[in-house]
Image: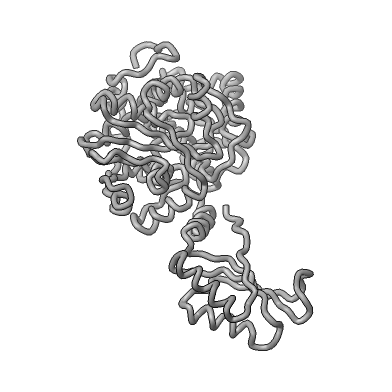
């Protein structure tokens, strides 16, 4: 960008176009694919913008490269520093590697191991600080003050917003008739840039943001008219667990974004399951936020044209993915955790499992206990994880077991 704009000046469309030229040959033009399941549910054509297939696994490299490439040689020689739960970390590390800058990244304690490993693999030094992105950002600012390294903010900088906005340019080129763009929102860099690009090309287009309900800083901030900080954020969507909007991004969102909605972690789990089963797409919880909003009806798109949901990232810990799949199956009524009391006699466990098999349900695991103080003498309790075909099949299985004399109760779901 030419000159340093006032912190609250909105970007111009020319800023996004300039970033697009800068990123040519550096980032991928990611696919835009149709979603038949979401089209059937919403009654309007829905497309998915697959930034989970971007270099480093998310859109973040767009903003990171734009920012670092515009540093002077002297600034790059001092190194760069960033704060991130993972995706911005990887974007900064990759961009710094391509541009010959030394990168240090502060990450929250408990950041997903695959994101940490990938960031280190791109050559960045990793430091841990606090339990949230906001804590890590404070540590990164201190590091920049001490060492002279240039802070590459995860969202609240014009160059970062401009780079992220190139996603919007691609969507308008790939689907010129789009009427709604829906995307996850953390700090707001992606939706700010997309809104600038989209509103310039199509003023009537709707831009909708989605936050995890356990870390939704924008609704109270918009209600107050200024960025407000949450006391805490609790969500499986680490990529959008940001406690306070940026000043610059808040200015963009408050003026350009049409609506912010929220979804639960259960909604995110169900969306990930749909993306895996129906689209063969690996997406992280934050990246599935737009799909979750469409699935649940948290946002209902207009019926006069296509909607595009941005899959903002695909960097998910495989262990979390396993838990999320189980949780998504449970939410969809396709995975049961049961406690079944039965008499403690030879052959009783085989009889119980035989009845489940007769109902065409699949036992995933089983644990047999005689020692629980809840049990009467001569009783045993069997804890079962069972796959079913859906809510009706689950209800029929439970009814059959109870009709056979078993005392059946549902075990509390602890994932995630």
Identify the residue at image location x=47%, y=37%.
Answer: 211
The image quarter containing residue 170 is top left
Residue 371 in the image: x percent, y percent? 77, 73
Using the rendered image of the protein, determine whether residue 65 is visible from the camera's viewpoint.
Answer: no
The image quarter containing residue 190 is top left
Residue 372 in the image: x percent, y percent? 76, 70
Relative to 271, 365 lies left or right = right
Relative to 330, 158 lies left or right = left
Using the rendered image of the protein, determine whether residue 162 is visible from the camera's viewpoint.
Answer: yes
Residue 254 in the image: x percent, y percent? 42, 22
Relative to 85, 25 lies left or right = left
The image quarter containing residue 256 is top left
Identify the residue at image location x=53%, y=43%.
Answer: 116
Which residue occupies the extreme bottom position in the image? 346
Identify the residue at image location x=59%, y=41%.
Answer: 234
Q: In terms of depth relative to the viewer, which is nearer, 78 or 183?
A: 183
Report the label total. 0
Q: In terms of depth relative to the viewer, which is nearer, 160 or 186?
A: 186
Does residue 37 sit above or below 224 in this rendering? below
* Viewport quadrant of the N terminus: top left
Colour mode?
one colour
Which residue occupies the extreme front position in the image? 403
Identify the residue at image location x=59%, y=81%.
Answer: 404
Does residue 416 sit above or below 343 in this rendering? above
Does residue 393 sit above or below 135 in this rendering? below
């Amino acid at each position: 960008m030419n000159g340093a704009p006032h912190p609250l000046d909105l970007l111009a469309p020319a800023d996004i176009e300039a970033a697009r030229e800068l990123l040519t040959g550096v980032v991928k033009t990611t696919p835009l694919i149709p979603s038949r399941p979401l089209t059937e549910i919403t009654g309007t054509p829905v497309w998915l913008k697959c930034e989970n297939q971007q270099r480093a696994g998310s859109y973040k490299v767009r903003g990171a490269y734009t920012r670092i490439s515009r540093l002077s040689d002297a600034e790059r020689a001092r190194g760069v520093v960033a704060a991130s739960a993972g995706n911005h970390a990887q974007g900064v590390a990759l961009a710094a590697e391509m541009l010959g800058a030394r990168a240090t990244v502060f990450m929250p304690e408990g950041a997903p191991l695959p994101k940490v490993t990938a960031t280190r693999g791109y050559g960045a030094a990793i430091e841990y600080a606090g339990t949230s992105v906001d804590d890590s950002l404070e540590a990164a600012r201190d590091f920049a003050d001490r060492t002279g390294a240039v802070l590459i903010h995860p969202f609240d900088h014009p160059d970062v917003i401009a780079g992220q906005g190139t996603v919007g340019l691609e969507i308008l080129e790939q689907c010129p008739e789009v009427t709604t763009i829906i995307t996850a929102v953390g700090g707001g860099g992606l939706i700010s840039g997309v809104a600038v690009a989209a509103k310039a090309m199509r003023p009537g287009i709707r831009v909708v943001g989605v936050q995890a309900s356990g870390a939704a800083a924008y609704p109270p901030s918009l209600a107050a008219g200024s960025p407000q900080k949450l006391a805490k954020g609790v969500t499986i969507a680490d990529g959008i667990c940001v406690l306070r909007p940026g000043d610059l991004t808040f200015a963009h969102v408050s003026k350009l974004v049409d609506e912010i909605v929220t979804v639960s972690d259960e909604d995110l789990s169900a969306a990930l399951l749909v993306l895996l089963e129906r689209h063969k797409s690996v997406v992280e919880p934050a990246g599935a936020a737009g799909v979750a909003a469409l699935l649940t009806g948290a946002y209902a798109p207009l019926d006069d044209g296509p909607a595009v949901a941005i899959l903002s990232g695909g960097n998910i810990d495989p262990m979390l993915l396993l838990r999320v799949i189980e949780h998504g199956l449970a939410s969809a009524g396709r995975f049961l955790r049961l406690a079944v009391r039965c008499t403690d006699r030879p052959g009783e466990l085989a009889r119980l499992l035989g009845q489940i098999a007769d109902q065409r349900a699949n036992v995933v695991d089983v644990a047999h206990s005689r020692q629980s103080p809840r049990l009467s003498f001569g009783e045993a309790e069997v804890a079962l994880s069972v796959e079913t075909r859906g809510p009706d099949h689950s209800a029929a299985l439970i009814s059959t077991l109870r009709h056979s004399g078993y005392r059946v109760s549902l075990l509390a779901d602890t994932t995630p």
